[in-house]
Image (cartoon, rainbow, N blue to C red):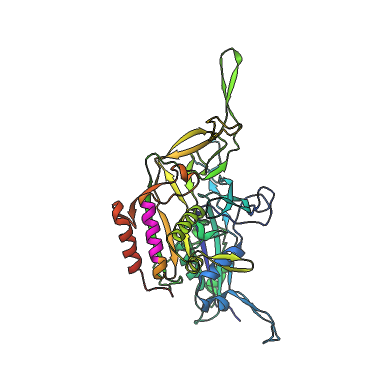
Amino acid sequence: MEVSKKVYYKIKFTLSSPLALSSGENNYADRDVIRDASGKPFIPASSIAGVCRNALKAQYRDSYLGYVQKADESNSETAAGDSMIMFYDALMEKKQNDPKNPNQEHTEKQDQEYKISIRDGVGLDEYKTAKRGAKYDMEVLEPGVVFVTYIEQNLTDSKSVNVANIVADLFNSNKLCFGGKTTRGYGDILASEIKQKRFDLTEPEKTKEWISFDMYGDATEWDDYDYTEAQEKQTETETVITLSLKQREGSGISIRKNSSKPSEKIDLPNGNFKKIPEPDYEQLTLSGDEPIPVIPGTSWAGAFGHQMKNLGLNDSDYKDLFGYVKGKETKKSRIRFSETQLKGSTSKKISRTAIDRFSGAVVTEALFTERTYYHGYTEEPLRITINGKLNSNQKGALSAAIADLGYGFMAVGGLTAIGRGLFTIERINGKEVMEDEVFETVKEFLSASGGEHK
C-alpha cells in the first residue's frame, strides 16, 4: 500500500517515580534494570509499544499496531498485519555542558547523572510476618532522569487516522507508566517537550524535504506540537483521590533498607581514632545531597488492603480491586497507589535492644540501630487511582480506611506496634479537611464519582 504522508514525533519526558524495568538478568539483584551496550539504562521500543497498545482503543490496535493471528481449532491458517507505527528506544538525553566554563567546548554534550539503587521486597501475611520464600530484591532507576524517544507513522490515504498523534497525546497526559509494578507507583513519567514533523509525499518539494530530514538533528528540524488538536479519550473511567499527609508528632517511618555504608571514622588526639557504626538498617530513601525518605506504592497498597479487609471487605471484592496471582491465573489490580516523598523531615539514629521478659536483662546480641525520619510531609500528595467503578462495599471500606489513616488508626511500614508510620490528613483533593470530616468527605466524593460496579 502506497504511503502518502509521514508523521514524526519527538517526545522528551522525565522519570517522576522509580523505574523497575527488568532485563531478565540477576547479576546485581534478583531483577536487574535493563541496560544498553554501554551499560546505561534505557526503555526499549518494544516496552513503549506494548504500553501504548494497551492504552489505545481496540479499534486502533490491530489496524495500526499490527497483529499475529495463530492457527487454532476454528481456523487452520495464520494471519499477520504490519504495524503502521514505528516506535524507537527511549534513551537518556545528553546534557549540554555549561557554556560559561571556558575549559569546555560549547557544543560538547555529556551523559546525565543517574542512580540505580536496590530495593528489597517481601510478602507479608495478615500479622505482618514475612512469608516463606517471598523475599526478593530488585534494581530500580531512581527518578529525575530525562529520556527522549521518537514515534513515526505511515499514512496511506485520507481515511487513515493519525494514531501516532493520539499516542503523543497519551504521553502529554502523563498517564503512561513503564516497567513493572506500575499499579504500585513505579514507572511514572512527566512529558516536558513534544515536537512534530509532517510530510505530504504527494508533493515533490515535501518529498525532497523528507529525504533530507534528520530525525536526530537539531531542534530547528522540528515544529511545535499542536496541543490543541482534539483527540479521543483513550482511558477508561477512573477515580482519583489525592491525600496531602503529614507525619504525626513523635511518629517516625520505618520502611527498611539494609545499610551498606562503612562505619564513620573520627580522629582522636595522639593519632587514635574511633569508629561510629552506621545503622543496621535505615528508612528507604532516594539518593541525593539530602536523602529524601519515600513510601513506595507497595507499602501503601499493603497497608490499605490489610485495613480494608479488617473493616469487612470480603475476599471477592478485595481480589476484584487489588488483583491476585494464583498459579497461572492472574488479575491486574484496579487500584493504584503512588510513591510518596516526605519533604522537610529530620533523620535520627535510634539504638534498641531486646529485653528478657523474666529477668529484665538485655538479650545477648539483640542490640541494633536504625535510622528513621520525623516531621515530614508530602509535597506531592499520595495519589490513589481506581480504574473502573467501585461497588458499595468497596466504597465503604476505602472511605473507612482513609478515615482510619487520618485518625491514626492505620499505620504504614514497619514497627507500627511502637507508633511508627502514623499520619494526619491535611487536604483531600486539594481541599483542607478537619480530622472528623475525612470519612464523609471521601464517601461523598466516591458516591459522586459515578455508578457502581457490579
Quadrant containing the C terminus is bottom left
The residue furthest front is 358
Quadrant of the rendered structure where residue 312 is?
bottom left
Q: Return the residue nearer the eye: 321 or 386.
A: 321
Q: Determine whether, in the image, residue 208 is placed left or right of residue 372.
A: right
- Determine whether 254 is above or below 15 in the image: above
Q: Is residue 230 magenta?
A: no
The residue furthest right is 76
Quadrant containing the N terminus is bottom right
Q: Which residues are the magenta region?
A: 395-406
Quadrant of the rendered structure where residue 447 is?
bottom left
- Determine whether 8 is above or below 14 in the image: below
Q: Return the residue nearer the eye: 298 or 76.
A: 298
Q: Return the residue nearer the eye: 212 or 365.
A: 365
Relative image position of residue 120 (x, y in whole percent): 59, 48
Is residue 229 in sight in this rendering? Answer: yes
Q: What predominant SS class does the magenta segment belong to?
A: helix
